[in-house]
Image (cartoon, rainbow, N blue to C red):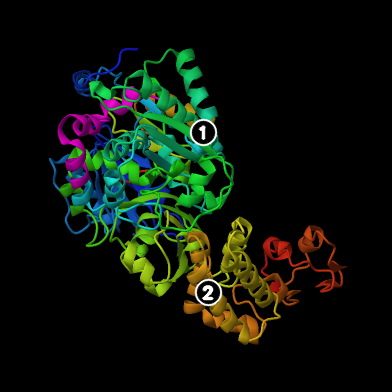
Amino acid sequence: MNKLSPADLDKMSKAPVDKPKDWIKVGLSSCGIAAGAEDVFNFFVEEVKKRNLQIEIKKCGCTGMCYAEPLVEVSVEGLPSVIYGAVNKEVATKILEKHVISKMLVNDYIFEVSI
Amino acid sequence: MYTKVILVKDTDLKREDKTREFYTRLLDYLREASLHEQIQVVRVADIGVYEQGLVVKVLPDKVTYINVQDEDVKKIVDAALSDGKIIEDLVFKPKAKQCRIVLRNCGKIDPESIEDYISSGGYLALKKVLGELGQQKLIDEIKISGIRGRGGAGYPTWMKWNFAREMNSAEKFVICNADEGDPGAYMDRSVLEGDPHSVIEGLIIAAFAIGASKGYFYIRAEYPLAVERIQKAIKQAYDYGLLGNNILGSPFNLDIDIRLGAGAFVCGEETALISSIEGKRGTPHPRPPYPSVKGLWGKPTVINNVETLANIPVIIAKGGKWFAQIGTQTSKGTKVFAVTGKVKNSGLVEIAMGATLREIVMDICGGTLSGKPIKAVQTGGPSGGVIPENLLDTPVDYENLQKLGSIMGSGGMIVMDEDDCMVDIPKFYLGFCVEESCGKCAPCRIGGFQMLGYLKKISEGRGIPEDLGQLRRIAQSMQKASLCGLGQTASNPVLSTLKYFEDEYNEHILNKRCPAGKCSSLITYSIIEDKCKRCGICFTNCPVKAISGGKEEGYSVIQDKCIKCGRCFDVCKFKAINKK
């Protein structure tokens, strides 16, 4: 890989973000993994492939709400991005079917704590 | 497509949950008004506000209304559909708010991707330092910011750096202290796992400030994921030319290595940490000379905590003045706390210095899990003290906590309710320190052991009034004569509980009673005949068959056999077990 020059660094940090519009982030720090986040992450990756959904599944660290792990943040165009807590495969299915496909927030699992 | 979302949650724990009821009512209203295709109503698990009745939050406006009544529904819906109208008398104005500097990227970026870090502004501070600032201006900027070490002692970071910079030595070192060992504290782990590059960037800047060409991460081996992510991040930084020779095209060179701690608490103390990296036994040394003068391999060394280093890039990027605006007179910036214990929302909280303990525990973390009143809050782990409920309004900073007989420490915060015994708590912490004492100096080795003996004696009901004086005497000599921070502070939990909860000690000593029902030697379980329904659940659950009797004649506890595990107390549905 090429070593960065200061100008390269500027370019990288200002580069237009051509990230996919929709994404799901799964918190994969020790606290999340202990609560089963790895299973949830793998489940999302598999299901998205199986259902051929246009959404990116990403990893992230812990936001600090350790009591509600595994945490999953979902951002889908047209809906406010929200964090779901205590997510298992069942909730993950609901998130995909309701939130991602039908574009409606899922009841009872949102942890809306303003940070 | 919905234009607005209304989140609903009943936050009053004392009554039956009314979330569903209100949810249906709101839906009915929307249907009647034919607005149900514009607004989605969602029940949530947590709305970030506690003990404020029915709470409603409108998204994407992020407006929160509290203590909502049925007649407010129309107003709220109208306001939600208008352009930015807010119902002033219902809107929630938060008392305490988190302020994220250290945790800025945690939970936002992919910790295993350097591109993510760079696109959120990462390594720009390093560029600024190398290209514009230079050593002197860099240290000046840190001085203006007023940041103090987040590892516990609170020594000004710029002074550490400046001492090391002024030393004339061909070789200098920087070390990131990630040997986080306090029970219940895990802020550093989360930062290392969630945003490893911020710590690496901080360490590179520190190295540049003092002119070091070699750096170490000292991470405890119990954090395998943190080690893995730091390893990955270091490799990425090398690949991009942010480590190694000629960093970002400048003449500055730096190599970073990882050293694993082998599980000794004392190795978080800087001189012991240095011994450990040198391959020696991890025991502390007398200071001075301080590591900034004579540290690793006898060379000037700066040791900074993970959290301190994670702050550095932000200070450089936004300026020392900006940072100095946050916090109190003597303590600038924010502090991350790992709030655990009997609290509803345990987790990490980053607040500006000067917020009160009550705001952290009640407003941000939602109070106690059991709903029982808070008895005390313990800060600073085994080196800290216990702060009673009536002092929770003290603003958090280094000096205030010290005045209360506790310390800021690395940021562990353990919440205790009525069921925690104030003799048992210091016994636990002291037990920890006795285990972890390296044994090099007598005050810590012998003093800790002796104090633990007295605490055990008191908790077993064999204490005499003179023991308290003896505890104080030993505690003071440990504070004065111990070699390192571990011994000097090990007595803090005992002294602070003696200061605020002496009554509870006396209750153990004079009346042989443990008010919290924790000290097993001082409690007895018995069955209250009037309340007993003779279901036999205690009988079947007792692990040592210490409950005799039958459904006909009733049950009783055989005191000689009882091991006081409390199983019967927990399983009895009729509260027919008496714990005294």
Does residue A102 lie above or below B214 as drawn? Answer: above
Q: Chain of mark 1?
A: B
- Horizontal side of B108 relative to A46 (left or right) equals left
Count of numbered badges drawn on the protein: 2
At x 31% / y 39%, what residue is drawn? B206
Which numbered circle lies on residue B225? 1
Residue B58 within the magenta-colored segment of the rendering:
no
At x 61% / y 72%, what residue is drawn? B451
Residue B134 within the magenta-colored segment of the rendering:
yes
- Residue A68 placement (x, y as % from top left): 47, 43
Report which residue position mark 2 lands on.
B477
Can you tell which quarter of the image residue B120 is in? Answer: top left
* Secondary structure of residue under mark 2: helix
The kind of residue tagged 1 is: Leu
Look at the image and tell me whether residue A109 can be seen.
no
Q: Magenta residues? A: B112-140
Give the crowd class for mark 2: few <14, some 14-19, many >=20 residues within 10 Å. Answer: some
Main SS of the magenta part reads helix
Does residue B4 lie above or below B566 as drawn? Answer: above
Name the foreground residue: B161 vs B371: B161
Query: Which of the two marks, 1 or 2, is nearer to us in this view?
Result: 2
- Horizontal side of B441 relative to B392 (left or right) equals right
* Secondary structure of residue under mark 1: helix
